[in-house]
Image (cartoon, rainbow, N blue to C red):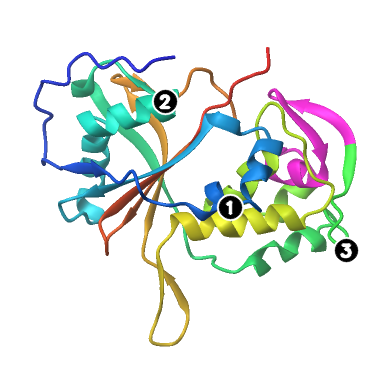
Amino acid sequence: MPMLIEELDEEPGGTAYTFHHLADAKFFSFQSAEIQPYFEKWGFGPDMAMCTFRVEQKVNRETFQDMLDAFFKDREVLHVLQSMTSARVFSPSKVSVRWQEMSTKVVSMSFFNKLEEAGCISSSGHIRGRLEEDWEDVPIVNLIREAILMEESELYDTFSPEDRREFLLRIFQHLIFGGASNQYEDHIEDYFKATKAVYKDLLSVRRSDTGDVEVLSTVASVQSLGEGGALYQKDSLLNFCYVIHDPVVRHVKVWYFGFRPLW
């Protein structure tokens, strides 16, 4: 569905921001002969997108909301998103981004050891299956999906409320659930491999004075554009849109997937 851009000549309110699309920005996960085929196999296809912009102005915690609002009102941004996603903006002046900041405290894949501890995977990494059950149009075919999604399950406590705000878990979760034509894996290793690749593509990190990995990026899980537009063609638990800001190089990255049913 095309994006409807009807009022781009108007001056958006608030602080002015200037964005430039970095068309040559590379994403290893999208271009790797090893990782990219997984995205096709798991049903993402052309409905998943990654892109990078540069914002000319400094952005901090206090101005992050202003930046997000300006981002989804910007002419260049909207034209790029129109070509890559199913998001659409009807009236930029009415755009008011609703979002949740994701935590980036967890930086080690050892975080997922709790999947084996809970019995969702075996010691060899085999993903334990279960009788298939539909949960809000999402097929629950294994114990990992059950632990992530089904609140009534005893496995739901595998991940705490704090865990569920971690961006590393969100990446893994999206890859596990995939799209409508998902040909899911029986072994966990490929999901871990792809999770690490996406994480490295999207986040900027550095070593602290103590040698620990420190994430510099701010991650926004975008949930709504307000009355000014719509992010997706169809409501689905599998939709996602993240805007990630790197304050060092002033990059703004978008990771997006709009679920499209097979019929």
Q: Residue at x 68, y 12 (%)?
A: 263
Q: Which residue is mark 2?
A: 231
Q: Residue at x 22, y 23 (%)?
A: 92
Say whether marks 2 and 3 touch (CB < 8 Å). no
Tell me how far mark 2 sits from mark 3, CA to CA: 39 Å
Q: Which residue is mark 1?
A: 32
Work out whether mark 2 precedes mark 3 in sequence or the reverse, and give the earlier one: 3
Q: Position of residue 221 (x, y in %)?
A: 43, 42
Tell me how far mark 1 sits from mark 2, CA to CA: 27 Å
Say whether marks 3 and 1 touch (CB < 8 Å). no
Left or right side of 55 for 153 = right
- At label 1, counting other C-alpha atoms closer than 10 Å, the crowd grade (few under 14, some 14-19, many 20 or more) is few
Judging from the image, what secondary structure is the residue with disc 2 in?
Answer: loop
Work out whether mark 3 precedes mark 1 in sequence or the reverse, and give the earlier one: 1
Judging from the image, what secondary structure is the residue with disc 3 in?
Answer: loop
Q: Nearer the viewer, residue 62 or 91?
A: 91
- At label 2, counting other C-alpha atoms closer than 10 Å, the crowd grade (few under 14, some 14-19, many 20 or more) is many
Q: Is 60 above or below relative to 262? A: below
Q: Is residue 9 magenta?
A: no
Q: Which residue is mark 3?
A: 124
Q: Which residues are drawn in magenta?
A: 131-154
Q: Residue at x 73, y 65 (%)?
A: 113
Q: Position of residue 90 (x, y in %)?
A: 28, 15
Q: Nearer the viewer, residue 111 or 29?
A: 29
Q: Amino acid at mark 2?
A: Leu
Left or right side of 117 for 199 = left
Q: Quadrant of the N terminus?
A: top left
Q: Residue at x 18, y 22 (%)?
A: 93
